[in-house]
Image (tube, rainbow, N blue to C red):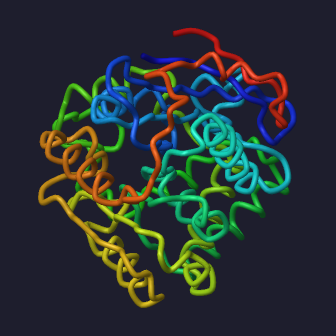
Amino acid sequence: MKKHMRFLSTDGITKIHAILWLSDTVKPKAVIQLVHGMVEHIDRYDDFARYLTGQGYVVVGHDHLGHGESVTDEEKYGYFAEGDPARVLLQDMHRLHVFIKQQYPNLPYFMLGHSMGSYLLRRYLSTQGDGLAGAVVVGTGHESDASLTAGLVMIRSKAKIHGWDYRDEKMTNMIFNSNYKKFDTTGADPENSWLTKRTDIVEAYYSDPRCGFMFTLNGYEALLSTILFCGQKRNIQAIPKDLPILITSGEDDPVGGMGKGVKKVYDAYVKAGIEDVSCKLYPGDRHEILNETDNAVVYADIKDWLDAHIPEAAPADPSLAYGETEVLVDPSYAYGETEVLRS
């Protein structure tokens, strides 16, 4: 069962689009919230979400501001919010978390973030990690403070001249740096795409108008400032030491520096004293391991990790009715009315 919803963004203006996946037959044992990546949308995770619901998970995720069905017009693609756009994205993640937790108060709550979503999740863990049973960080990486700071200076300088909604091709080329040179990043050569070895996925991505658009300076400000935040020692130290974390990626993922950046993140978490952190790299896999040729193995590995980290004392919730969703229409919701759009 699949429900489309909307809730009010922290920007106070936009109705954020979200999807809730449920099983009609399998009793839920935990909730997992998905946080999608840059220039894509949450419905690309439909196959993975349906797999998890069959394994006993309630799955939810939303389109970030500037993405998917949360976009009010085409000019808003790749633009988040005025002021501190990264903070607005994080607050929207938390709004959905709080709301869904209200509906399933007795179920353990996990989060999974991919790519840009992995950085948002890592930042979220530093401030809201206590509310989670575990986190799965997919397709992440590490960049130097110097390069990120230089990028942010460039972004802010350009924004003073052109405005925050400006789209700068040079900035995009800088983000897709030398790690990407061996791959195609345009969709022209699907077999050599940086995304995945599956040409059907690549072709679908580049033919989808909701994917592959160019970020605004506002979007890059949010992305780079979040990556910079994630790498700071004090922010890593703020992650709860007892929070289980799985870091996983393709060994040939340019976002993760072909595995090197992923290992740096893992090492930093170990050094910070996080008690249960593990890292798994898939040989030959590129950026989207959930869409790779071996995704059945990836799915099962993530499911097994989640199963192993469901608290043994987690009580069953007798109020759950195998996918009942009427409660989602809740006019008393503190952040604005949540509306079920369609199934």
Outermost residue to the top: 342
38 lies left or right of 201: right
Asked whether, in this view, residue 82 is left or right of residue 262, the answer is: right
Location of residue 47 with respect to 191 vertically, above or below: above
Residue shown at the point (44%, 59%) measured from the top left: 135
Residue drawn at x 50%, y 80% is 241
Residue for point 63% across, 11% down: 341
Q: Count all numbered tags in the image, as a single digit.
A: 0
Query: Between 261 and 334, which is closer to the camera in this rendering?
Result: 334
Residue 234 locus on image (x, y percent): 63, 86
Residue closest to the eye, 336 or 169? 336
| Quadrant in which residue 77 is drawn | top right
Quadrant the N terminus occupies: top left
* Up-down relation of residue 245 to residue 282 (above or below): below
Name the spot of residue 50 as percent of width and height, x first: 33, 27
Residue 320 image position (x, y, % from top left): 51, 28
* Residue under the image location 37 percent in, 26 percent down: 46
Looking at this view, is 322 or 313 the one in front?
313
Looking at this view, is 247 or 53 the one in front? 53
Figure check: 125 above or below 138: below
Quadrant in which residue 263 is drawn = bottom left
